[in-house]
């Protein structure tokens, strides 16, 4: 075969497999304890670490799946901390969820600038927390699944493993397809239809000549899609409604969203 799709992982992720490393950062111990209590109500086996300031997290590894951050904390705000977390992730595939917990609604717009997953307002209601936490778990499982998925393609006499999370988009040119990756391109002989049917719901056939990785979308209009790295690819106007529905469905199912 020209390419092979990795199906080693099942779509279902058990609760045990979904254990997360969680950081709770708030200068109020009562809030830290409350969040930890609500996390444990959802799953008692997660690893939780507590921080009273942004400085404490910055001096640690920051290797967490999920951050609960207060926005107003000492010399370094939760927003500044979130920006630093995102900056450290720019050159890696490491992904995490950031949830802000605060008593100040006026910071909500700034929170989305750092791609915050959600914004919980104090006092925290447990039903709302449970809903947000379950969605965060789902998104972390999507991160992990996406990190493991790959295809194998033949390039000349060589076979290459291409991880799906490295693919920005795929372009059809004559009988070849070109994989536009995070670092460079890979060409092989294949049919777009075959790729489309095997890559799954995180890719969308936006034009007869393009398949886009929805994870890499950073902006779109009725006739074009911009992906990470700055490339603009064609979106057939008749496919625009289907693209929007596919993107919303992908996001609702825990996909990585950058728009």
Image (tube, grey):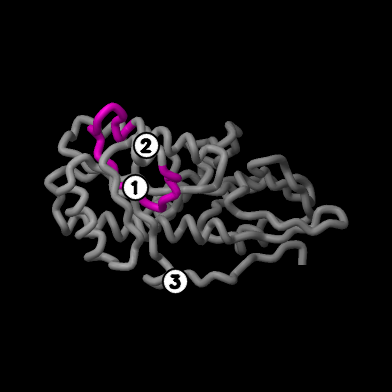
- Marks 2 and 1: CB-CB under 8 Å? yes
Residue placed under numbered mark 2 in the picture: 82
What residue span does the magenta drawing correspond to?
60-79
- Marks 2 and 3: CB-CB under 8 Å? no
Nearer to the camera, 8 or 227 = 8
Secondary structure of the residue carrying tag 1 is strand
Dot 3: within a 10 Å radius of its alpha carbon, few (fewer than 14), some, or many (20 or more) residues? few
Tag 3 or tag 1, which sits nearer the N-term?
3
x, y (%) of residue 254? 40, 56
Nearer to the camera, 81 or 8 = 81
Residue placed under numbered mark 3 in the picture: 12
Tag 3 or tag 2, which sits nearer the N-term?
3
- Marks 1 and 3: CB-CB under 8 Å? no
x, y (%) of residue 221? 47, 35
Residue 94 is one of the magenta-drawn residues: no
Query: Separation of disc 1 and disc 3 at Cα?
Result: 24 Å
Residue placed under numbered mark 1 in the picture: 67
Look at the image and tell me in which quarter the C terminus lies: top left
Residue located at (60% from left, 33% from top): 231
Query: Separation of disc 2 and disc 1 at Cα?
Result: 9 Å
């Amino acid at each position: 075969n020209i390419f092979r799709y990795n199906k080693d992982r099942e779509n279902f992720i058990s609760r045990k497999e979904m254990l997360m490393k969680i950081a709770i950062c708030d200068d109020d111990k009562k809030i830290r304890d409350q969040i930890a209590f609500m996390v444990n109500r959802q799953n008692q086996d997660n690893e939780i670490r507590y921080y009273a300031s942004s400085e404490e997290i910055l001096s640690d590894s920051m290797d967490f799946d999920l951050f609960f951050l207060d926005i107003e904390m000492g010399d370094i705000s939760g927003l500044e901390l979130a920006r630093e977390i995102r900056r450290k992730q720019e050159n890696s595939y490491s992904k995490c969820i950031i949830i802000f917990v605060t008593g100040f609604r006026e910071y909500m717009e700034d929170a989305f600038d750092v791609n915050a997953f959600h914004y919980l307002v104090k006092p925290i209601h447990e039903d709302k927390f449970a809903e947000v936490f379950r969605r965060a778990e789902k998104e972390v499982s999507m991160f992990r699944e996406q990190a493991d998925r790959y295809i194998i393609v033949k390039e000349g006499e060589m076979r290459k493993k291409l991880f799906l999370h490295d693919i920005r988009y795929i372009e059809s040119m004559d009988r070849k397809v070109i994989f536009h990756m995070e670092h460079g391109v890979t060409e092989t002989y294949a049919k777009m239809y075959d790729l489309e049917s095997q890559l799954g719901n995180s890719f969308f056939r936006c034009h007869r000549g393009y398949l886009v990785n929805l994870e890499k979308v950073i902006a779109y209009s009725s006739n074009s899609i911009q992906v990470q790295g700055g490339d603009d690819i064609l979106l057939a106007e008749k496919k625009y409604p289907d693209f929007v529905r596919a993107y919303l469905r992908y996001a609702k199912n825990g996909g990585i969203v950058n728009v």
